[in-house]
Amino acid sequence: MKYKHYDRDLKIKVVQEYLNGAHPKKLALKYNLKSGAQLVYNWKKSIDNNYNIGRNPMDCEVMKMAKKLKKEFKNPELKKLEKENNVLRKKLAEAEEVALLANAKYEILEKSMPSCTSQQILIMLMKDKKANLAIIKTKIYKHFVFSTIYEFSFKFEISIHKMRHYFHVSKAGYHKWVNRNSLISSVKIGDSLQNDLVLQKYKSKVDPRAQDLIQACFDAYKGLATGSKTVNQWIIANFQTHISVKVIAKIRKENKLEMPSAERKKKNYAGINRNKKYRKDDLVRDNFQLENVVGIDGTEFKIFINNKLVKQNCMIAYDWSNSRIVGHHFNPTENSNSALKILDMIEKYAKKNNQKMIVQSDEGTAFVNKNVFNFVHKKRHQITHSMSDAGFKHNAPTESLNGWVKSKFFLRFGNIYDSVEHFLSTFTEFVKMWNA
């Protein structure tokens, strides 16, 4: 097969005329190009790809064949390893995304439910789908989720579609939130978003008549002391409008809408003058994510025996890291004897797991006494006692778990029993099921 060769100068001249606007077909007729307009396109492509214009066409065929042979003679095992490496790299990226989203979900739930740690809530949500749906439907949860989706779509380039399904929120709801907060769409802004992204804080809607309604309530009670809860109920009953207790308390404080309270004689409670040497510092405070912490607190079970209401006081200890019930003890009153028995159970639990534990309790008389002090400091070395400060919402995870345990127990076994012994044996069986 004979090839027609063209000078390099001619090729450059034809391409220049083509770039200046000349039609390829007219150039082919003008310079008598054998392959027609396609040859003009090939010369243009050669220049774009930095190829030598005057090169022999056979060189191109040789290069193509060389690439083909390189592919064919590639080691099959190396091919397989590269493929597996790509799969593992993809799985690692997905695992990192899931871990990132899981940490974000913990933080979101902690902000949405300040009465308990997010870790405890997630454990409960795995057992109760109705509670999961109840939290997901709240406005504050959706606000924090939408903020996280918006931020992660820029910083980590995670798919918005994937995050919506992970957090169980709708596409329409997310885009409404973006438009409502006057945010720029991720499609429009691209990579120009700065790392120091600042989003608006969550603000619940407050009835514009709130201050007037609170004042109307005070006028109706004619100077009597009125709490925020009473004001909340009065507004619902008279105006069919709900204003939260927190909002009422905030408005009262800002506008000084305080009613004069009735004078009461101050009582000298035993807790005020309790010996300070038996009190311990608060090692936990609001850091509920600390490891190796056991919370201990008392709760009350109301049951019916022979159609009579019977109250059973129980002191329970929980391992905050896994919600496990470490120990429990029933007693007519919450006293130091119950506390000592529970502390002994915690000591055995700590030795079994070969780790030192922090025991978090309140400053009640059951714990601030000589017997408990001697038990912890003179006889045991595996546990450290910590007491929450006065006025602080102590043991938030423990109190929350008390509520979950009671609701789950009564839901499964009911509150009617033949005797106290029957109730105690049933609760022991429930603890085994809970810890399983």
Image (cartoon, rainbow, N blue to C red):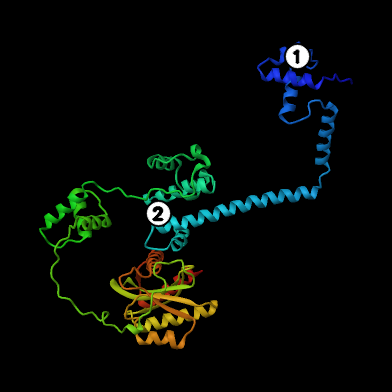
Q: Which residue is mark 1?
A: 28
Give the SS element for disc 1. helix
Q: Residues within 10 Å of mark 2 (few under 14, many from 20)?
A: some
Is 226 or 45 nearer to us in this picture? 45
Report if the CB atoms under discs 2 and 1 are less than 8 Å apart: no
Label placed on residue 125: none
Q: Can see residue 422?
A: no
Q: Quadrant of residue 412?
A: bottom left
Question: Can you give x and y, in whole percent of width and height, for residue 200 in the image?
Answer: 38, 48
In the image, is residue 87 above or below residue 299?
above
Identify the residue at image location x=18%, y=53%.
214
Q: In which quadrant will I find the N terminus?
A: top right
In the image, is residue 24 above or below residue 316?
above
Question: Can you give x and y, in whole percent of width and height, for residue 132 in the image?
Answer: 43, 55
- Residue type beneath disc 1: Ala
In the image, is residue 153 above or below residue 5?
below
Label placed on residue 135: 2
In this rendering, would 242 be left or right of 339? left
- Residue type beneath disc 2: Ile
